[in-house]
Image (cartoon, helix red, strand yellow):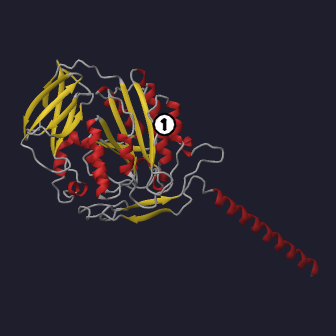
Amino acid sequence: MKPFLNKIFILLILVCFVQACSSGDSEEKSNDSGEGESEGEGESEGEGEGEIEAPDGDQSADGEAGEGEGEGKSGEGEYETDGDGESESDTKEAGQLTAGEWNDLENWDFWLNLLQLEEWSGMPGYWKFYPFRRVSVNVWNEGVPVADAQVAALNAEQAPIFSARTNSKGRAELFVGLFDNREQPSLILNVSKGEEVQVESVALPLDGSPVNIEIAASAETEKVLDLMFCIDTTGSMGDELAYLQAELRNVMERVSANIGSDFTSRISVNFYRDEDDEYVVSSNNFTDDLNLALQQLNARSAGGGGDYPEAVHSALYNAINEHDWSASAAARIVFLVLDAPPHYESEVLASIQSSVAAAAENGIQIIPVVSSGVDKNTEFLMRFMDIATNGTYVFLTDDSGIGGSHLSPTIGEYEVEYLNDLLVRLISEAVTGSEPAYDGSWK
């Protein structure tokens, strides 16, 4: 019996040894699998401290009713590059994220009716934006649309109310009482391009049709495209940031290869987080060096944050006021990529109003690109901002299966597109005034 027992004893020792080695390997793999994921606590729920209650029907990021800034996801920790220095975005391919677009200016009756609904009627008062009294102005020169003309609205005492520039289609969008909800019986429109000035009085309210003004515009618009990306890089963006970087890289390459053949393309890539993070705003000057812009785009990872709202107002102020936007351009666009609202404070709201007004005056279109985690409050603020600057609203959808759940916007029917194709289309429309015909070269 002894030899037999000795064999059993030896076998037991071998089994224990194999199990110990297997456990060690498993633990090592578990530790290694954290690469590219948050090193902090991951996603957490944070409740904002709005000064007033959010409008009824507000849906927070997790689908439950919220107040103030609502609830949303946040995550701390860095999304690191891998060991050989290659960023996670370099491993992603473009043409994966799906998105939709909704232009409230082109669906104006829908917008006005939407804000009459009890569920959403409190949004203007909450954000202190009152985009109701719209005056569209078309500027012509012998039947040809005049782009980048300055259009100022003055009251009867000739005090300025709102100023904007015409887009590539020759249209400027003005708003009466945008920030104070005041009415005006009439406006004085001052339209200028170069040394040519045309003044016209307009009685309000209008019947909804645009005001057409003929001007002998002698100054041509420079064939310049100013393209800016302003990206939230807090921890909660970690589920989609690498994909977004791949999509934006593809957009920049296609714009430079196609639009860049006829226009001078200047690109600025900027990032922001929140107070007490590694940085609040990290910005880069406009450059016509595509490779430099791509390096700047790929250099950032997601981290920090910790609560739902972020330093949106600081990023917007920097984007609009602290960059050398072209004095004359075919189009100026800032894509604001984010998944959370600004902090709800009076100073913050005042800063956002000031930046939006400056953007409109300088012909800078604000086009939000909202990601997973956005709530209804944020959706409406972004739509207020894009309306005021003659922009449009872009939102990621669940169709790609990438990232967290995406909020369904309160809009009409829309088409699902790949995000990179959608952004290239919007840029081309902004520059040329028409949608490009697809011939395969945009892929």
Query: Can residue 287 be spotted in the picture?
Result: yes
Answer above or below: position of 220 versus 402: above
The quadrant of the image that shows the C terminus is: top left
Query: Can residue 409 be spotted in the picture?
Result: no
Answer above or below: position of 418 versus 43: above
Residue at screen point 28% across, 46% down: 354
Answer above or below: position of 134 versus 437: below
**Residue 81 appears at what percent x and percent y?**
59, 47
Answer above or below: position of 410 versus 386: below
Residue at screen point 39% across, 40% down: 322
Q: Quadrant of residue 378?
A: bottom left
The quadrant of the image that shows the N terminus is: bottom right
**Residue 418 appears at what percent x and percent y?**
40, 40
Task: Inspect the image, locate mark 1, and give the three-letter code of the amino acid beneath it.
Answer: Arg
**Residue 376 appears at what percent x and percent y?**
30, 56
**In this orientation, which residue lies closer to the viewer: 35 or 295?**
295
**Where does label 1 land, which residue?**
249
195 lies left or right of 378:
left
**Residue 208 appears at what percent x and percent y?**
11, 38
Circle 1 residues within 10 Å: few <14, some 14–19, many ≥20: many
How many numbered marks have been drawn onto this rendered protein structure?
Answer: 1
- For mark 1, give the secondary structure: helix
Q: Quadrant of residue 341?
A: bottom left
Residue at screen point 78% across, 66% down: 18
